[in-house]
Amino acid sequence: MERHIQILLNRISFASLTIGTMTLLFLFLQTPETCVPQGSIPKPHQKFPKSTCDFSHRAFTSIDKKNRRLWSTKDWLNKLHSFSSFFTDLQTLNHLHNHSKVLCVSAGAGHEVMALKQIGVGDVTGVELVDSPPLVSRADPHNLPFFDGVFDLGFSAHLDEALFRERFAAEMERTVRVGGVCVVAVEECGKEEVKEVAKLFRKSRFVSAKNVTLTGSKMTRIILRITTPP
Ligand SMILES: *[C@@H]1O[C@H](CO)[C@@H](O)[C@H](O)[C@H]1NC(C)=O
Ligand SMILES: *[C@@H]1O[C@H](CO)[C@@H](O)[C@H](O)[C@H]1NC(C)=O
């Protein structure tokens, strides 16, 4: 009796093993139905991007579209115009030329960068904590990623809001060559405050201060010429 059962159990386990193996073999040889056979035309719902390149292309397209919308707004055009006249004034004063290498620090969305390019300045770099491609790259104003003295003119309309004004000014000075100028637009102020701002630029000589209207705000434009290398 016991031997009988033993034989039966052996047979059953052998049968299960065979069935299991056959099933696995069958599954292995089957092409899953969810796979798209090679060479077949994908149905509309199966259109996937061909590669990661497709994604980057899409990203750029959407930035382009966003920029085109932004750059055609009335607010953008007004600010652009304001910066253009601001820089045209610097051209008249002989501080800025078409061949000048210009750095705009804390350039926001890049109004000043676009304005400089539009009036004919070929080499303009804009930096801000948050980038706005293609006009503005990401960089910390307190730690600019540029060598000493590589620019002819450094500009910022945001020295007032800097976390560390001395450090901000020192970095602008460091990246502008001796003989070049730093131009800052600060909240409208009188002689004493102008002196305070000028003092931040330790390697420069004060050139001039003038009240101006920039992007609808009353501001004071202060120009300093670099006299001492870093
Ligand atoms: C500077 O560039 C602008 C725009 O391209 C041009 O109209 C102007 O004549 C140039 N100025 C000089 C001095 O070459
Ligand atoms: C700017 O205007 C204010 C108010 O009229 C005046 O107090 C200040 O001295 C002016 N600053 C400069 C640099 O001319």
Image (cartoon, helix red, strand yellow):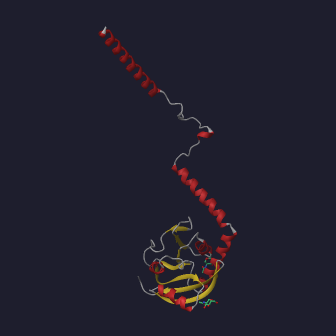
Which residue shows up at 62% across the image and 63% down it? Answer: 67
> At which x and y percent is residue 32?
51, 30
Image spot of residue 193 (x, y percent): 54, 88
| Viewer-nearest residue: 229 or 186 | 186
**Which residue is rendered at x = 54% and y = 82% of the image?**
183
209 versus 214 height, above or below: below
Query: How many labels, in total?
Result: 0
Q: Is residue 94 left or right of residue 204?
A: right
Q: Residue furthest top?
A: 1
Asked whether 1 or 227 is in front, the reply is 1
Splitting the image into four quadrants, where does ligand 1 fall? bottom right
The residue most toward the left is 3
- Location of the N terminus by quadrant is top left
Above/below status of 154 relative to 27:
below
Image quadrant where one finds the C terminus:
bottom left
Find the residue positioned furthest to the right: 74
Q: Quadrant of residue 210?
A: bottom right
The residue positioned 41% from the left and 22% from the top of the image is 20
Left or right, residue 21 beside residue 152: left
